[in-house]
Amino acid sequence: MRIEPQSKFSCDDVEKIIRETKKIELGSQAKKNIELSRRIVEKLAFGDKAIYGINTGFGRLAQVRISKDQLSELQVNLLRSHSSGIGEAMSAENVRRLNFLRILSLAKARSGISWPLLERHFDYFNRGLHPFVPLQGSVGASGDLAPLSHFGLTFMGEGYFLVGDKKDSAAKILKKEKLEPLKIGPKEGLSLTNGTQFSLSLALSVLAQWKHLRPWIEAAAALSVESFRATNQVFDPKVHELKGHAFQKIVAKRIFDLLKGSSHMKSHEACELVQDPYSFRCIPQVMGPAYALIQQAESLLEDELNSVSDNPLVFYESQEIRSAGHFHAQSVSFASDLMSMAMISIGNLIERRVDQLVNPTSDRLPAFLASSPGLESGLMIVQTAAAALASENKTMGFPASADTIPTNANQEDHVSMAPNAARKADYILGNLRKILAAELVCATRAGVIESTRSGKSFSPKIQLLLQWLGKNRAELFQSGDRVFSEDLQFLETLIQTEDCPI
């Protein structure tokens, strides 16, 4: 696959590409533009005019003029000094995504880097090389400085690569791969550290995980509706035509379709249960707007991944270099917080259904779904665990994008906090997956109890889901108390790694 200046990618495109083994390369026009852009940098760097970050210091030190014989040393010092990240390593998958996102931005030829330096990015991607990048230490402007500096160090043969779950010296790995360390010229260190791709990679990972999780959320909701003897009539598409929210209609139709053909649902035609609790009745009204928030987040992320995020910018057409603020990751920060808000709300809704399924005050199912309530506690503490996770997510509900802290002697006086927002969204998504596992445990047991008691079958799709769950985890269909943590952990892994069967 070739990357050209006009190449445009969706978030889904990025996920597909980083999971493929196909090699990528720079298109001929892009390479020509890269060379034109580099000539401008080399010409102006050694001129008399002060140009930020090329022949001056950085940040608050921008007023310091650098002598012509120290321009390369300036860039090397930048990479070394800015490699101040801390914490655990970014995953290899996220580093691979980060590298691809860097390629997309640099290939637009507005950074002024040399062709060998950009080519080395392609070498890393095509050979499956993943620099060690710490997860903490960036505020999301001026770019993701610390993490991207660790990435950039490796081009000089310094720093580390990830090898499995450990790190090994970059000098050793480059030698093994027969890749010579590169010399970093004027502006190149700055171009390697400026950018939003660290935050963007983390946010895109959350989005991809969410898209995998979404069908599971809908399937578990439908299973809970059946198991709780709730009505499917509230999901009838004609009901939701009265609302103007597109995603609400999508959710309602999805649940309605999952429940089609249920003889159990037909039994509600003369049912004494007049209305169901909101956590069942208002699934489309809550999940629809949540989906809309995530769509808006995806739009922001897609715009960012197709953008230039460097500073200063090279305009080879007019032979000038201009400073701006494209490194600022506010769009990524907002997108991550939108996803967090949506996932917190969905987690709250799921936890309330879990409580309704086990709560004896509902009078629909045995207390805590125990075979012998009192002697057995049943799924009492499964609900408690789900409540703990939902509450933990709520404590993380403060938007990181609403925060800012001045850095660099107040030169960088407004920052995005995009890395914090993305990492927080990832944590919230992990909790949501666990809450969903709790719903599947409770809804499955409730479904067994209800179908045995009523003698009626569930919808074909819900029956298929139950059969699939039973095939993978027979213990879910057993009565009596046991160590439910093992069920929860098994299901959490299952829904993370397997596609929803319905």
Image (tube, rainbow, N blue to C red):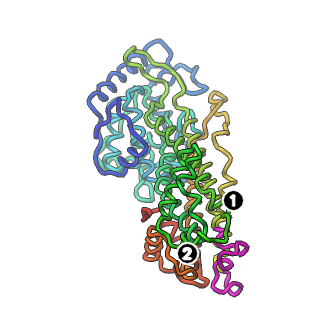
Residue 22 seen from this side: yes
Q: Position of residue 169 (x, y in %)?
A: 41, 50
Q: Secondary structure at mark 2?
A: helix
Q: Is residue 98 above or below residue 30?
A: below
Whole-number angstrom distance, CA of label 2 to CA of label 1 = 26 Å
Residue topped by disc 1:
391
Residue topped by disc 2:
447
Circles 2 and 1 in contact, beta carbons < 8 Å: no
Residue at (49, 39) in percent of width and height: 299
| The N terminus lies in quadrant | top left
Count of numbered marks: 2
Residue at (63, 27) in percent of width and height: 411
Q: Which is nearer the N-term, disc 2 or disc 1? A: 1
Q: Secondary structure at mark 1?
A: helix
Residue 172 seen from this side: no
Q: Position of residue 248 (x, y in %)?
A: 56, 49
Q: Residue furthest top?
A: 48
Tell me where residue 443 sits by quadrant.
bottom right
The type of residue carrying mark 2 is: Gly
The type of residue carrying mark 1 is: Ser
Q: Position of residue 397 (x, y in %)?
A: 67, 50
- Closer to viewer: mark 2 or mark 1: 2
Tell me where residue 392 sits by quadrant.
bottom right
Q: Which range is magenta?
A: 354-377
Q: Residue furthest front?
A: 270
Q: Is residue 208 above or below residue 303?
A: below
